[in-house]
Amino acid sequence: MESVQYHAPQSLEEAVPLLKQARQTPSRILAGGTDLLIQMRAGVKSPEMLIDIKKIPETTGFEIGADEIRLGAAVPSAVMDESPELHQQLPGVVEGMELIGSTQVQGRATPGGNLCNASPAGDGAPAMIASSGQCVVFGPNGVRTIPVEEVCTAPGRTSLADDEFIQEFRFPTPKAGQADAYLRFIPRNEMDIAVVGVAANITVDAGGICTAAKVTLGAVGPTVVIATEVAELLVGTKLDDATLEKAAEIASGLGSPISDKRGTAEFRHRIAGVLTRRVIKIAATRAGERL
């Protein structure tokens, strides 16, 4: 690798002049670096300046409120996994992040970095989208808020400007009878990227009727697929076996997966249906336990 300027601002205010400089100097935001440093070593990315946001307090903490959960974009996966509160409130979001890499990688990997790497097979995005996550995006002109699903626009590409980074994520605090879940299929037992990943966020009432649902599929298209037809099918049902089978059938027809060494497009379509059925059932069970 060529020599690179490295900056680690201690506050959002200190980051502003660096972000302005990033408009002219090829730069990258360093949230975790587990993908970026490998890409730099391979010559895929060649920034002249790195801006490490891990020392900015607003990016490295989380807070669970009555109406909103705030999660810093640079909170390590390992910290998320060690939080009983996050496991209770957003188990699917935690599941997506705790599947990334080895124990050592999880000490660095972050939800902001995973999302902005913009891999179609990223494990963090499906559950964050299913749980209606919003991104607080910081730049020299202040902040703006966008849904998580509007960040990734294509493999390796995002809607963020060169002088912006995600400061934090915000999720509605789950209400009674609401929970999420995430599952993926990989060809190995661990430390591989998803062949398919599916997330679900389900709300049920005291009678076991589904009153709200959101299902998302990863690695079956260039960006996360929001399975609107599946959600519409689920609402108003008791999520019985027949409904789940129909949901799986619909999910199997969604997206435009590729064929590669991890699986064919046909295989990905099929696995998407299998995982959809399973993850809905898990989320619904969790939701029922929260009544």
Image (cartoon, grey):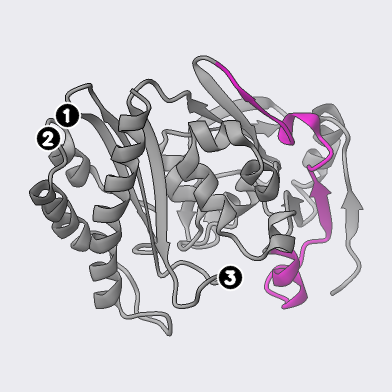
Label 2 sits on residue: 237
Label of residue 191 in the image: 3
Pointer 3: residues within 10 angstroms few (<14), some, or many (20+)? some
- Residue at numbered disc 1: 209
Q: CA distance from mark 3 to mark 1?
A: 37 Å
- Tell which circle, 2 or 3, labels the residue nearer the N-terminal end: 3
Residue 43 place in picture, x, y as percent: 73, 76
Could you tell me the amino acid type at mark 1? Ile
Look at the image and tell me whether residue 98 can be seen: yes
Between 134 and 75, the one nearer to me in the picture: 75
Q: Are marks 2 and 3 in contact (CB under 8 Å)?
A: no
Q: Left or right: 127 with respect to 231?
A: right
Q: Residue furthest left?
A: 242
Mark 3 or mark 1: which comes first in sequence? 3
What residue lies at 69% left-to-right and 70% top-to-bottom? 39
Could you tell me the amino acid type at mark 3? Met
Q: Secondary structure at mark 2?
A: loop
Left or right placement of residue 6 versus residue 203 in this view: right
CA distance separating discs 1 and 2: 5 Å
Going by the numbered disc 2, the residue's amino acid type is: Thr
Q: Are marks 1 and 2 in contact (CB under 8 Å)?
A: yes
For disc 2, the neighbor class at 10 Å (few under 14, some 14 to 19, many from 20) is some
What is the residue that sits farthest to the bottom in this orientation? 261
